[in-house]
């Protein structure tokens, strides 16, 4: 009796594993499938200059433009942009609402547990947006940690919260905000004393914010806060990721690439060099 039950359970487990494998295979997105449908769905969070919709209603930014070129080389002509909040990018990816995340997302060991990342397309440091004149003299995360009266705004789901905690900033000095617009408004109105993002984003926010705000200069970026941005794929889509990485490697660093990303504030100094997603996922970047 027990032997029969044991054999039944083993057979049931094998059948379930085969079914699960078949479902995983059916759900995997391949380059051919994308070529056949003629477009790829890319999620973005409306963060300038990484991925956003411009005044003409066109999806643009460093990440969508690089992805657009790479997919063209793969034979996929169009990108269908899907706007979502930053914190929903990876959950939506794994729920199959889109095929990749093209939002300038930093590649970190924690995120590598949720998604498979392309090799990086850029590297970049940090900065703060502050009120005009930088009244609290904030030039680093450590400066915020040293002043208990100061509050720091970070984007919900972004890496800056981790950088703040690593610098010793307690949670009651950190304010999570949904997007760049709310961060800019919070600094302008004094609801936070500074907002933390990458240096390119902060420069753009300072330009938009007018005379009431400015970029904190100079700014000391901790070594661990130098970020490498890439594209997130589902872990099941290994064939798609491999093809993307192949064409990405041929494109990054070329004259065509540098001209493409120049309008977004990226230069040769932002090239990722030989750093790979594999090393970044291990925390070795």
Image: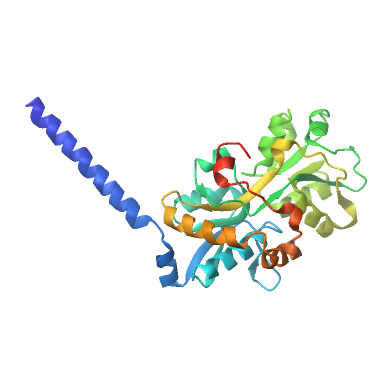
Horizontal side of 144 relative to 282 (left or right) equals: right
Task: Tell me residue 110's x, y (percent).
Answer: 55, 38
How many numbered callouts?
0
Horizontal side of 207 relative to 13 (left or right) equals: right
For residue 251, say whether it is visible.
yes
Horizontal side of 282 relative to 128 (left or right) equals: left
Is 202 located above or below residue 248 in the figure?
Answer: above
**Which residue is most to the top?**
2
Is 219 located above or below residue 239 in the figure?
Answer: above
Task: Tell me residue 255's x, y (percent).
Answer: 70, 66
Q: Which residue is depicted at the point 24% across and 43% down?
A: 16
| Nearer-the-camera pick, 35 or 45 | 35
Q: Which residue is depicted at the point 75% across and 36% down?
A: 222
**Which residue is most to the right?**
133
For residue 83, say whether it is visible.
no
Is 142 located above or below residue 117 in the figure?
Answer: above
Image quarter of residue 82: bottom right
Task: Tell me residue 36's x, y (percent).
Answer: 41, 72
Q: How is the image coloured?
A: rainbow
Image quarter of residue 164: top right
Image quarter of residue 173: top right
- Image quarter in which the N terminus is found: top left
| Nearer-the-camera pick, 85 or 118 | 118
Horizontal side of 241 relative to 187 (left or right) equals: left
Q: Which residue is depicted at the point 39% across and 56% down?
A: 28
- Image quarter in which the C terminus is found: top right
């Amino acid at each position: 009796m027990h032997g029969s039950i044991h054999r039944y359970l083993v057979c049931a487990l094998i059948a379930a594993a085969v079914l699960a494998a078949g479902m995983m295979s059916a759900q995997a997105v391949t380059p051919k499938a994308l070529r056949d449908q003629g477009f790829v769905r890319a999620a973005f969070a409306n963060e300038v200059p990484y991925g956003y919709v411009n005044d003409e209603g066109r999806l643009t930014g460093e990440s969508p433009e690089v992805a657009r070129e790479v997919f063209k080389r793969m034979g996929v002509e169009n990108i269908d942009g899907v706007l979502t909040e930053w914190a929903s990018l990876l959950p939506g990816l794994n729920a199959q609402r889109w095929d990749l995340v093209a939002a300038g997302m930093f590649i970190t060991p924690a995120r590598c547990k949720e998604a498979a990342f392309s090799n990086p397309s850029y590297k970049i440091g940090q900065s703060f947006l502050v009120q005009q004149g930088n009244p609290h003299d904030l030039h680093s995360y450590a400066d915020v940690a040293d002043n208990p009266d100061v509050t720091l705004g970070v984007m919900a789901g972004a890496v800056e919260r981790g950088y703040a905690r690593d610098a010793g900033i307690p949670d009651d000095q950190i304010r999570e905000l949904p997007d760049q617009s709310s961060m800019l408004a919070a600094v302008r109105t004094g609801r936070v004393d500074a907002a933390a993002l990458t240096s390119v984003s902060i420069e753009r926010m300072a330009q938009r914010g007018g005379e009431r705000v400015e970029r904190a200069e100079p700014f000391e970026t901790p070594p661990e806060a130098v970020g490498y941005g890439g594209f997130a794929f589902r872990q099941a889509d290994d064939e798609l990721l491999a093809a993307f990485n192949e064409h990405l490697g041929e494109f990054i660093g070329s004259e065509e690439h540098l001209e493409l990303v120049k309008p977004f504030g990226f230069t040769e100094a932002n090239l990722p060099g030989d750093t790979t997603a594999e090393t970044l996922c291990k925390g070795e970047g």
